[in-house]
Amino acid sequence: MTEIFLERMAWPDVEAAIAGGKRRAIICAASSEQHGPHLPEATDALLGEEYARRLALRLGDALVAPVIRPGCSEHHMTFAGSLSISAELLMAIIDSYIESLERHGFETFVVISSHGGNYPVLADWAKRKPRADCVVISDLAVFQPAFDALRRFGRTDTAGPHAEVLETSMMLATHPDLVHMERAEPGFEGEMPLKELLEKGMRAVSANGIIGNPIGATAEMGEAVLEALGDSLATQVRAQA
């Protein structure tokens, strides 16, 4: 398979790919933050890379820029190891990514996020600096088809997604060596709007840093979820392009 990650390519290969028509760049804003006692702090960065990879394969004309992390994770900062940057810095980094990529010949851009705390920032960035050459996915509704995919496995979870069955299953499908299922346990399983979570902070809502229930997650679930999410992202990009 032809490489699609810029970080894994030598510059002549990037140049050749752009000349060959791959002039769309996918930028994913992720995070470096706690994901319960059973998932690594790199969860959003690792999953964001996988979202971008599957999206690029579906679009056919895209390369994947280095995943951005840390992200806007102030609501996780009471858990050890979490990192956070300001909304202004995240927006400045996205601006710098696009400016750099434009200089190399990229013509269109897709900005997505694998971390819930970045979604309001992406929405604000898109309003402040609207660009006809840029598609921004800033609505968590993009995950609904992924939750729908879980129903095939008898799961009707609606809480999350944070370190629960959705993220845990995806990590089992992609990085099983980093998952400690013996430590998995339910977290807060009620309804928690993102805005309220950002205001209260994760520790005030969930003592273990989980929203939802990771128990019972499998790699098979994760593959189904990732396929559904890849399709959902591609559908939204094509609708907005």
Image (cartoon, rainbow, N blue to C red):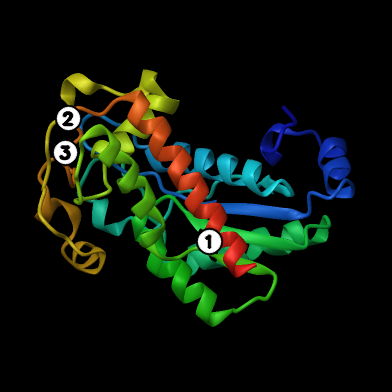
Residue at far front of view: 152
First along the sequence among labels 3 and 1: 3
**Residue on which disc 1 sits:** 236
Q: Where is residue 155 shown, x and y percent of the image?
A: 20, 38
Determine which of the numbered discs, if any, sits on residue 213 in the image: 3
Amino acid of disc 1: Gln
Real-space CA distance between mark 3 and mark 2, rounded to the nearest whole angstrom: 6 Å
**Dot 1 lies on which element?**
helix
**Dot 3 lies on which element?**
loop
**Dot 2 lies on which element?**
loop
Q: Nearer the viewer, mark 3 or mark 1?
A: 1
Quadrant placement of the C terminus: bottom right
Of 103 and 217, nearer the camera is 217
Real-space CA distance between mark 2 and mark 1, rounded to the nearest whole angstrom: 31 Å
Determine which of the numbered discs, if any, sits on residue 215 in the image: 2
Q: Is residue 128 left or right of residue 179?
A: right
Q: Residue at x 24, y 40 (%)?
A: 80
Q: Is residue 10 left or right of residue 217?
A: right
Q: Where is residue 144 shown, x and y percent of the image?
A: 34, 54
Real-space CA distance between mark 3 and mark 1, rounded to the nearest whole angstrom: 28 Å
